[in-house]
Amino acid sequence: MAIRIVTDSTCDLPPALIQASGITVVPLTVFFDDAPFLDSVEITADEFYVRLSESRTLPRTSQPSVELFREAYERCGADGDEVVSIHLSSKLSGTLNAASVAREEVSPGVHVDLIDSYNVSLGLGLIVLEAAHAANTGAGLAEVVATARRAMDRVSVHVAVDTLEYLQKGGRIGRARSFLGSVLSIKPILHVEDGEVAPFERVRTRAKAVERIFEIASSMARTKTLFVACSGNDDEARELIERLRPVLPHTDIILGQLGPVVGVYAGPNALGIAALERE
């Protein structure tokens, strides 16, 4: 009997890592007007940002259906394997609730443990990767769940956004609302705190925002894995990684990308880091 890891598409993990780790991803949906696209299945991140730049209206998102979750659980548990299902913060989406309903509808004998990560994007992705590594190295159900929960306490996310417009219009601005009304030249740096988007700092220019993200990452000497992610053009992210490698020689630094659903709220030109501290 094995432990199977299920998550949702807001984890934003690179496809190669998802495949190598044996993770099952249930997609959310992005809507441009009335046209639905399954996140990272029917629309890639690159395609999304091109379309976002051309769209006159803000796209919207929808959580996965109960049926999509039920089908995923049935597939993963078909041979008696147990499932650990880890998802984006319940304070940001109804995704966890849909997963919970699906858990009640699966066939007898399919066991599903649900975890609210209280995180999103590659913060969620890091927690999922830790759980998958435990599962793939023979850990039992209790240890996989414990590994995920320990990782939750060691993950941090910081993102510099060009504007709060997308978070505000999308209804996910949370405590970052306190930054609204700032002068237009202010560039907000946000983080995830207690499952919500929260204000971290304000800087005056894009260059200073990028430099501040570098400073935050550089201070994380105990970081095991660091994702540097962007929404759209990845030149800044690649340059940041090259600067960070000599500063964090014992950290696995990976280029990431904010996927379509997360991009609806982060908007274009966001640059961020997701870090997992060593135990």
Image (tube, rainbow, N blue to C red):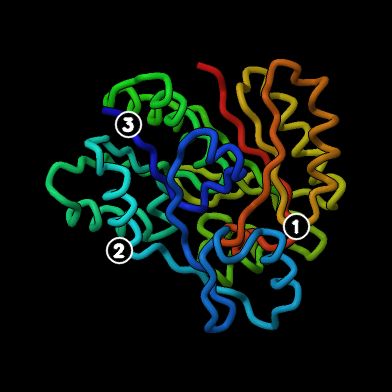
Please provide percent x and percent y for residue 171. 51, 68
Query: Along the polypeptide, which appears first: circle 1 or circle 3?
Result: 3
**Is 203 rendered above or below residue 29?**
above
Q: Is residue 196 above or below residue 122?
A: below
Type of the residue with mark 2: Glu
- Residue 55 in percent (x, y) is at 70, 79
Q: What residue is shown with label 3?
A: 3
For the point 54% across and 52% down, which residue is it? 197
Q: Which mark is residue 67?
A: 2
Bin the neighbour count of mark 2 within 10 Å (Cα to Cα): few under 14, some 14-19, many 20 and up. Answer: some
Query: CB under 8 Å between callouts 2 and 3?
Result: no
Secondary structure at numbered mark 3? strand
Q: Residues within 10 Å of mark 3 (few under 14, many from 20)?
A: many
145 in relation to 234, above or below: above
Q: Quadrant of the N terminus?
A: top left
Q: CA distance from mark 2 to mark 1?
A: 31 Å
Q: Residue at x 70, y 83 (%)?
A: 56
Mark 2 / mark 1, whichever is N-terminal: 2
Disc 1 marks which residue? 232
Q: Are marks 2 and 1 in contact (CB under 8 Å)?
A: no
Q: Which image quadrant is residue 215 in?
A: top right
- Tell me which residue sits at (30%, 63%) in the image: 67
Separation of marks 1 and 3 at Cα, in angstroms = 35 Å
Residue 205 relative to residue 187: left or right: right
Mark 2 vs mark 3: which is more N-terminal?
A: 3
Secondary structure beneath dot 1 equals: loop
Q: Most extreme residue toward the front, as rendered?
A: 79
